[in-house]
Image: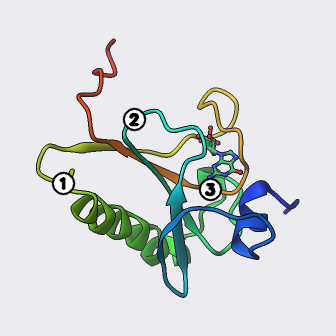
Amino acid sequence: MSETIFSKILTPEIPADVVYEDYGIMAFRDINPQAPVHVLVIPKLEIATVNDVQPEQAELIGKMVLTAQKIAIQEGIAEDGYRLVINCNQHGCQVVFHMHMHLIGGKQLRGLAG
Ligand code: 5GP
């Protein structure tokens, strides 16, 4: 897989505001937040898109959700709620091709129906 801005954050060649890290996952604040809380949860393993997730990575993907849950509690937004989003490829508006989950909250979000 080609190097992305997120692999440079992992090395860490590029700095980031890291809110969580363990052996398999890192989470850091989005540089262009869309809400008061906007954190990106990424696997350290370089997986380009959701299309590339393999069955044996199911536990890792589950841990991404549990990490987002933990951060939501840390950030004090769990009770009010939040949104988890994984964009995939062009129609999903994916820009960085190192799969990541957006944790967005801290304000009332619009419904997907607009
Ligand atoms: P995507 O559209 O691929 O799902 O989202 C990529 C996200 O990465 C965007 O929300 C963008 O603001 C964020 N982003 C891009 N470059 C950087 C960076 O260098 N640092 C951080 N913290 N976030 C970044």
Instruction: Name above or below for residue 87 compared with residue 1.
Output: above
Q: Mark 3 Cα within 10 Å, few/some/many (few <14, many 20+)?
A: many
Amino acid at pointer 3: Met
Place residue 75 in its image quadrant: bottom left
Amino acid at pointer 2: Ala
Q: Are marks 3 and 1 in contact (CB under 8 Å)?
A: no
* Residue under pointer 1: 78
CA separation, marks 2 and 3?
Answer: 20 Å
What residue sits 53% from the left and 61% below the top? 28
What residue sits 49% from the left and 84% below the top? 22
- In this rendering, the label closer to the viewer, 2 or 1: 2
Earlier in the chain: of badge 2 and badge 3, it is: 2
* Residue under pointer 3: 99
Q: Position of residue 48 (x, y in %)?
A: 71, 56
What residue sits 49% from the left and 53% below the top? 101
Q: Position of residue 84 (x, y in %)?
A: 37, 46
* Residue under pointer 2: 35
As helix, strand or loop, the secondary structure at mark 3 comes to loop
Instruction: Name above or below for residue 56 compared with residue 18.
Output: below
What residue sits 76% from the left and 76% below the top? 11
Amino acid at pointer 1: Ala
> Where the C terminus falls, by quadrant?
top left
Quadrant containing ligand 1? top right
Earlier in the chain: of badge 2 and badge 1, it is: 2
